[in-house]
Amino acid sequence: MKASSLLSVGLALLTASSVRAGGLFGAKVDYLLQVTNDNKDEELLEQAQPALIAFVAPWCGHCKALVQPFKKAAKKLKAAEFKFGFVDCDVDNDFCQSYKVKGFPSIKAFSEGKAEDYGGARSEDAFIAFANEKISGAGGGGGGGGGAASTGESKLAPTITYSKM
């Protein structure tokens, strides 16, 4: 009895771990990559297309809130020139640690094999604006209001300025 119970629990855990983030983002669709440690080179690092990748954990409430705007942006664009994807950090923890993911969700912009933190808004419109900027070659801006000046600062980090009225 005990051996069969342990086997049942083990199979249940194995099944749950293999569909976690896939379950968070729903059924597999062609416009949203599931990046793993096994496919990261061919799907992400060796590709010329820029990409926006969400590093998520299925139990994370903020990750769950990110799913709809992220998926909607990916579905609207379906651009061959830009990719959207996600990494399940519960399954591919080593991959997430290699990109210094410390909180969830973390979103990183990949271009020519290099990653930078995405600092823009987490809305469908901001994701689309960011992708369109990357496709047109206008640079970043983090989905905010345009690219950063050429001062050496990250183009993906939003710049906040204050003025007196």
Image (cartoon, grey):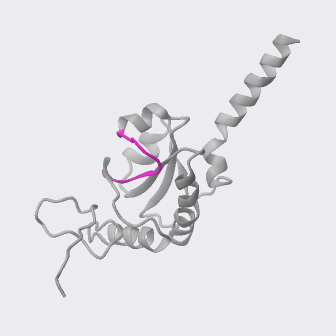
In the displayed structure image, the side of residue 19 where residue 104 appears, left or right: left
**Considering only vertical position in the picture, is 21 above or below 38?**
below
Residue 31 visible somewhere in the drawing: no
Q: Which quadrant is home to the N terminus? A: top right
Relative horizontal placement of residue 62, taking residue 48 as reference (left or right): right
Residue 117 in the image, given as x and y percentages of width and height? 32, 53
Position of residue 138 relative to residue 84, above or below, is below
Foreground residue among 90 and 27: 90
Q: As drawn, which residue projects farthest toward the right?
A: 1
Residue 15 appears in the picture as rendered: yes
Q: Quadrant of residue 96?
A: top left
Report x, y in % for residue 146.
27, 75
Residue depicted at 42% across the width and 71% down the height: 126
In this rendering, the answer to whether 141 lies above or below 58 is below
Q: Identify the residue at image location x=20%, y=68%.
A: 148
**138 shown above or below 30:** below
Rendered-image quadrant of the C terminus:
bottom left
Picture coordinates of residue 159 (x, y %)?
23, 68
Q: Nearer the viewer, residue 25 or 65?
A: 65
The number of numbered badges drawn on the structure is 0
Q: Residue 70: within the magenta?
A: no
Q: Residue furthest bottom?
A: 165
Residue at x-position 63% and y-position 51%:
24
Asked if residue 72 lies left or right of residue 120, the reply is right
| Residue 151 drawn at (x, y percent) | 10, 64
Residue at horizontal 82 percent and vertical 11 percent from the top:
3
Which residue ends up furthest to the front in the rendered image?
A: 165
**Magenta range:** 99-112
Furthest toward the left, the residue is 151
